[in-house]
Image (cartoon, grey):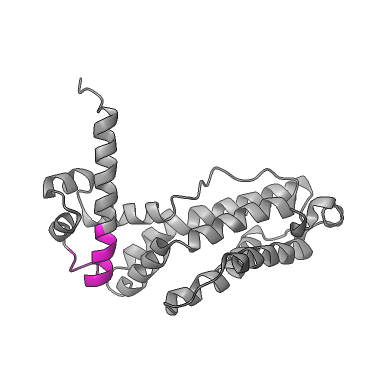
Amino acid sequence: MTPAPSAYHQRVAEEKRALIVQAATGLFLELGYDRASLARVADSAGVSKATLFKQFPTKAALFDAIVLDSWAENDVADVPPAGDLTAGLTVLGRRYAALLSQPEMTDLFRIVIAELPRFPELAKTHFSQGKLPYFESVRTYLLAERDAGAADIADPEMAATQFLGMISNYLFWPRLLLPDWTVAPARTTAVVEEAVRTMVARYGTEVHRDSPGSDTGSE
């Protein structure tokens, strides 16, 4: 039986993995997905090719890691409890705003968009492993609120799209096209709060809208 790696060796492996993912992201942006060979990634990361291939045997596996790392702050299993639409949407909205504010997220979208004509599978990976699980966590939450009587939602998929769109359309898409686009933390908070208020006004039940916790400004 092969002995389990020590805590030290696990830490070293994690550090090398992080260096590889960071180097790959930079090279994919600079050279394109096709021209950035695994050998160049290993050289840029300062690791041996054997070390890289041990963790990422293919370029596709390496891109998968970039996607998963970019969305890593989201725990799709951590859906807020139902019963308070304002509180739950505020948690999800703030979490989404934090994800979109990461430089890694902008880099990931730029890689996908640049390589879409030649490598459509990159977009599929990004959607299925990154965006879709987050979207599903929001949809699942809205379904739970509907079942709890806190929301009147006929189409949770549409509602989830509306909520995430209100946030990303201000915080993310302009930054993807305009490198100098910045949003102050106070403005980010306001964007999320307005999205929550809009959702509550549209989908919240009368009982919920009249409850003390239905005003995000009271937190």
Q: Nearer the viewer, residue 189 or 76?
A: 189
Q: Residue at x 35, y 68 (%)?
A: 112
On the picture, is 188 further left or further right than 107? right
Q: Residue at x 20, y 23 (%)?
A: 2
Q: Position of residue 169 (x, y in %)?
A: 56, 73
Q: Position of residue 57 (x, y in %)?
A: 19, 48
Give above or below for 85 relative to 197. Answer: above
Read off the magenta span. Answer: 23-36
Residue 91 falls inside the magenta stretch: no
On the picture, is 32 further left or further right than 47? right
* Residue 152 visible in this rendered orientation of the protein: no
Give above or below for 180 relative to 84. Answer: below
Q: Position of residue 23 (x, y in %)?
A: 24, 58
Q: Outermost residue, top direction?
A: 1
Q: Position of residue 21 (x, y in %)?
A: 28, 54
Residue 28 falls inside the magenta stretch: yes
